[in-house]
Image: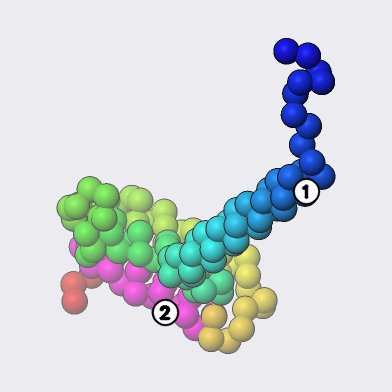
């Protein structure tokens, strides 16, 4: 087959194909935006607020798990590990020392209350005191 026998596309056909490609790109972009919005909604459901308590609560919660007061979500059991609990208390205490003078009063109170509760639980579990 020679070049002359091949049908050449008319400008109308070329324009129509270009328009279809643009529309396809728009649809893909809209789908991407929809997926991003859904991902954002899911993240908002999962992510806690970005504040000081978001820094303290994971240590506090893990310490409760190590005391055996809460179930470990991965192991599905309650085992006591006082050494690790003490380490978590020490980390929170270090956080308190490093942020001294830089916390809002409610943040400082929150951290103090968390530390107090964890220390009391530790002393009770370690048989230092009886409540």
On residue 43, the disc is none
Q: Indicate left or right for 6 with 92 as reference.
A: right
Question: Which residue of the protein is positioned furthest toward the top in this rendering?
Answer: 1
Residue nearer the viewer, 82 or 53: 53
Q: Is residue 126 magenta?
A: yes
Q: Is residue 106 magenta?
A: no
Q: Residues within 10 Å of mark 1 (few under 14, many from 20)?
A: few
Residue at the image position 28 percent from the left and 68 percent from the top: 121
Residue beneath label 2, please?
Answer: 113
Residue at the image position 58 percent from the left and 86 percent from the top: 105
How many angstroms separate mark 2 from mark 1 (CA)? 75 Å
| Mark 1 residue element | helix
Placement of 21 over or under 122, stated as above or below: above
Question: Which residue of the protein is positioned furthest toward the front in this rendering?
Answer: 5
Q: Which comes before the other along the chain, label 2 or label 1?
A: 1
Residue beneath label 1, please?
Answer: 12
Placement of 114 over or under 98, stated as above or below: below
Q: Indicate left or right for 29 with 4 as reference.
A: left
Q: How is the image coloured?
A: rainbow
| Mark 2 residue element | helix
């Amino acid at each position: 087959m020679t070049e002359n026998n091949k049908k050449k596309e008319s400008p109308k056909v070329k324009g129509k194909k270009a328009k279809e490609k643009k529309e396809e790109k728009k649809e893909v972009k809209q789908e991407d935006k929809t997926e991003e919005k859904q991902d954002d909604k899911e993240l908002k459901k999962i992510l806690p607020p970005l504040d000081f308590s978001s820094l303290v609560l994971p240590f506090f919660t893990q310490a409760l798990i190590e005391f055996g007061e809460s179930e470990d979500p991965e192991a599905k059991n309650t085992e006591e590990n006082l050494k690790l609990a003490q380490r978590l208390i020490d980390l929170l205490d270090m956080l308190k020392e490093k942020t001294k003078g830089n916390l809002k009063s409610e943040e400082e109170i929150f951290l103090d209350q968390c530390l107090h509760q964890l220390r009391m639980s530790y002393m009770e579990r370690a048989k230092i005191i009886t409540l």
